[in-house]
Image (tube, rainbow, N blue to C red):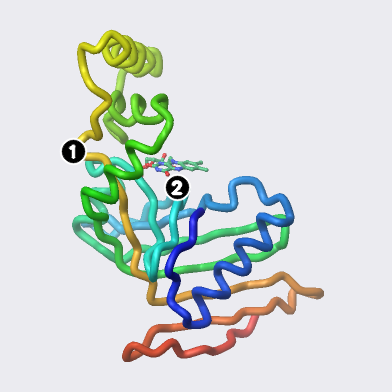
Amino acid sequence: MLFKNLPQSAPFKLFEDYYQNAENHNQPIAEAGCISSVDKDGNPHSRHVNFKYFFEDHLIFFSSYSSDKAKDFESNQNVAVNFWWASINVQVRLEGKISKCSEKFSDEHFYGREAGKNIAAIASNQSQEIESYEILEAKYEKIKSEIEEGIIKETRPEDWGGYQISIDYFEFWEANNDRLNYRESYKLENNEWRRFFLQS
Ligand SMILES: Cc1cc2nc3c(=O)[nH]c(=O)nc-3n(C[C@H](O)[C@H](O)[C@H](O)COP(=O)(O)O)c2cc1C
């Protein structure tokens, strides 16, 4: 995850410090966090994504705008994200509102990625049913050859791009002896971050 222009306020700095600490302790894929959304019928759904940037007060990942999660975000902007870094036994819970990144930002990320990942983004209709995995592999191979032969271009699909979460709640949880765990929270209230502690 890349950090840029983070607000000076405490929870952002603390998040970056914990993240760097996890990486320094060889945490595999520290940028992977579980994001939960709620669908139009009120049912929750969770999945991991790789958060690639923390820019200003926005946590950012990339995905299909036609996926199941995208449909959830359209009907309900409220999301929750959970990181658990086993290497330091720390959990960070975040909550906020999600929206799409600008097309320019999505383009910059897409055109800076490895071709293989982009071909997968072009070939796959994320979350849609398919008769078999082999059919998806065949779609991938066909598009790969067409790009290599110059028949089609490796263009960012219109329904693929960034999602940014504007955070309004952080909870930092650290494991401690006898389950007397440390819980430090920050809630955005009237544009001020209120800091408080929770019992474990
Ligand atoms: C560690 C990890 C990282 C992932 N990163 C992403 C990601 O950055 N973007 C994405 O769309 N899916 C990612 N996935 C796949 C998602 O978990 C999920 O299968 C996919 O987004 C479809 O979810 P949906 O059907 O709820 O929309 C990742 C999965 C794992 C296990």
Determine if the C-beta at disc 1 is less than 8 A from ligand 1: no
Quadrant hosting ligand 1: top left
Residue 53: image location, x then y, percent: 44, 56
Q: Is mark 2 on a helix, strand or loop?
A: strand
Name the quadrant containing residue 187: bottom left
Residue 155: image location, x then y, percent: 24, 29
Determine if the C-beta at disc 2 is less than 8 A from ligand 1: yes
Name the quadrant containing residue 56: bottom left
The 10 Å Cα crowd at callout 2, few under 14, some 14 to 19, many 20 or more, is: some
The residue pinned by badge 2 equals 49
> For the image shown, how many numbered marks are present on the structure?
2
Q: Distance between the residues labelled 2 and 1?
A: 20 Å
Q: Is 94 rendered above or below residue 102?
A: below
Identity of the residue drawn at 33% across and 43% down? 63
Task: Say whether marks 2 and 1 touch (CB < 8 Å).
Answer: no
Identity of the residue drawn at 25% across and 34% down? 156
Tag in front: 2 or 1: 1
The 10 Å Cα crowd at callout 1, few under 14, some 14 to 19, many 20 or more, is: few
Residue 100: image location, x then y, percent: 24, 55
Q: Is mark 1 on a helix, strand or loop?
A: loop
Q: Is 37 rendered above or below residue 10?
A: above
Identity of the residue drawn at 31% across and 35% down? 127
Residue 181: image location, x then y, percent: 70, 76
Which circle marks residue 158 in the picture? 1
Identity of the residue drawn at 37% across and 65% down? 58
Is 54 positioned to the left or the right of 138 in the image? right
Q: What residue type is labelled 1?
A: Glu
* Residue situated in front as seen by the camera: 84 or 27: 27
Q: Is 59 rendered above or below residue 145?
A: below
